[in-house]
Image: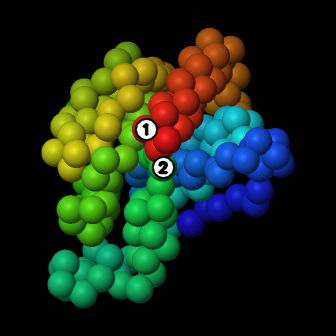
Amino acid sequence: MGSTGAPEGAASAAAAGRSLAMIVVVSGTNRAGSNSLRIATHLRRLVEEHGEEARLLDLAELPPELFNPAAYADKPAELAPFQEAILAADGILTVVAEYNGSFPGALKYFIDMLRFPDSLYGVPAAFVGVAAGEWGALRAVEQLEMVFQYRHAHLFGRRVFIKGVGGVLDEAGGINDAEIRRRLAEQVAGFVDFCRRLRD
């Protein structure tokens, strides 16, 4: 599970007497080396630039034991850091790939394994869709939003859909499309403010 040290803006937040918001960025697929993870890493940096704490959850790091049918009754201890991050989050920003017209099964299974009903309850949630196709995972995001609504999350209205995602990433995993960078930056700025307002 990815994590970071203190963000650059933490000192100014502390000086203002404001505690940091903790925003969890979820790479919503368990595919190793995914484009979702690259986008999620970029989003984590953007959150930190706003002086908040960011934690990256990569579903590729979920313990294999979690996918044993016995895990429904006896969850593996290795799931605990993921669960604790979700419970501690002041906001959750999920990168959603489109697999067969929907979001990845591993993401739904992860949500199913989270503690019910307190996980996701009342938590601000935002979404970025990524896909090779033309619609940038629009259907996948909208289907996942229904799951989050069922769990009583507070949905943030500004979504970003990245079509042809492989073409907007360079060899180092950076985003080479200025328009996509702008849209992600605007989304994160708005979402951070949304999280602060709901928390305060």
Relative placement, left or right, of 101 versus 133 is: left
Give the residue pinned by disc 1: 198
Q: Left or right: 100 with respect to 166? A: left
Which of pointers 2 and 1 lies earlier in the amino acid sequence? Answer: 2
In the rendered view of the protein, which quadrant contains the N terminus?
bottom right
Q: Amino acid at mark 2?
A: Asp
- Tell me: 68 left or right of 25: left
Q: Is residue 12 above or below residue 114?
A: above
* Count of numbered labels shown in the rendering: 2
Specify the label residue 189 is tagged with: none
Q: Secondary structure at mark 2?
A: loop
- Given residues 9 and 95, the one toward you in this image is 9
Residue 90 badge: 2
Rendering quarter of residue 126? top left
Q: Secondary structure at mark 1?
A: helix
Mark 2: give few (<14), some (14-19) or many (20+) Cα within 10 Å. Answer: many
Residue at x-position 41% and y-position 76%: 79
Q: Residues within 10 Å of mark 1 (few under 14, many from 20)?
A: few
Give how far across and how far down residue 37 sits, in percent: 55, 47
Q: Nearer the viewer, residue 76 or 119?
A: 119
